[in-house]
Image (spheres, grey):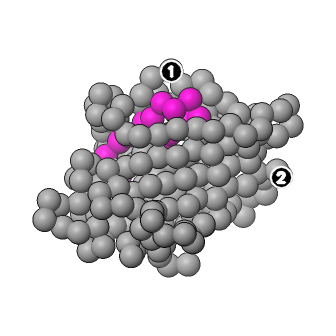
Amino acid sequence: MNEVIVKNCSEKNLNVYELQSNGDIYDGVRASVTLSHDDDNLIVKFDVIEKQLRRMSTHHNDEVYEDSCVEVFLQREGSPIYRNFELSATMYELVGEGECLETRVRLDPKRIDKIERSINILENTTKRVHYIIDEKINLRDWGFLKDDEKIEDLKLRCNMTKYGAKLEEPNRLTLFKMKEGYVTFHDKTSFRPIKFV
């Protein structure tokens, strides 16, 4: 798969994409993402099944990737800057921007708090959890979509991930495979185009 097709949220048959590991085997872990849009927003729905629900973050820009966490990486085509939206199952979020992991900066928590997001925990036992995380990222507010631009003309690159660095059994799943020997999801060479239709 070289791109994701993102349909208008009014469509009935939205595309669902399965996240994958990079060769690691995670027994009992599965994640998918459904993407849609309206005039200004990228609407993201993660559906996650795993063994443990870790919810320790207490503020925006905490180390949310240590929790049960989903992540959206977005980069406007032609720009060296990308933004990462990393959302803990606590609903606290880390949002950073920059050219790479080492130089990115974390953004204003008051601005982050305006992002619409929710979690629906469908199952939470000692052996299995199932939850759905919804997020609506306003592409104009976050500088991806210009004032005079229609979303169908926007050229973005992305990756979507499921992470949990401090789970008892850590896992890492991605929409687009990472290059062999990858260290971080922030590797922009794994980003692929989004086509808004």
Query: What label sits on residue 154 in the rendered view?
Result: none
Residue 58 percent across, percent down from the top left: 50, 21
Q: Quick one: which residue is furthest to the bottom in this view? A: 2
Tell whether 120 sits left or right of 76: right
Q: Which mark is residue 27?
A: 2
Residue type at mark 2? Asp
What residue occupies the far top of the structure in this picture? 58
> Relative to the observer, which residue lies in front, 12 or 157?
12
Nearest the eye: 7 or 69: 7
Query: Left of 70 or right of it: where is 22?
Result: right
Front position in the image: 61 or 153: 153
Q: In the rendered image, which quarter contains the C terminus?
A: bottom left
Q: Can residue 71 be seen in this view?
A: yes
Determine if the magenta segment contains residue 56: no
Magenta stretch, main secondary structure, is strand
- Tell me the distance, in whole angstroms, between the alpha carbons under discs 2 and 1: 29 Å
Question: Which structural element holds mark 2?
Answer: loop
Left or right: residue 26 versus residue 41 is right
As helix, strand or loop, the secondary structure at mark 1 comes to loop
Residue 94 coordinates in the image, percent (x, y): 42, 36
| Label annotation for residue 58 | 1
Residue at the (83%, 32%) spot, across then down? 125
Q: Give the range drawn in magenta.
A: 86-100
Question: Which residue is at a point 50% across and 78% down the rendered structure image?
Answer: 2
Quadrant for the N terminus in the image: bottom right
Residue 164 pos. (x, y %):
64, 40
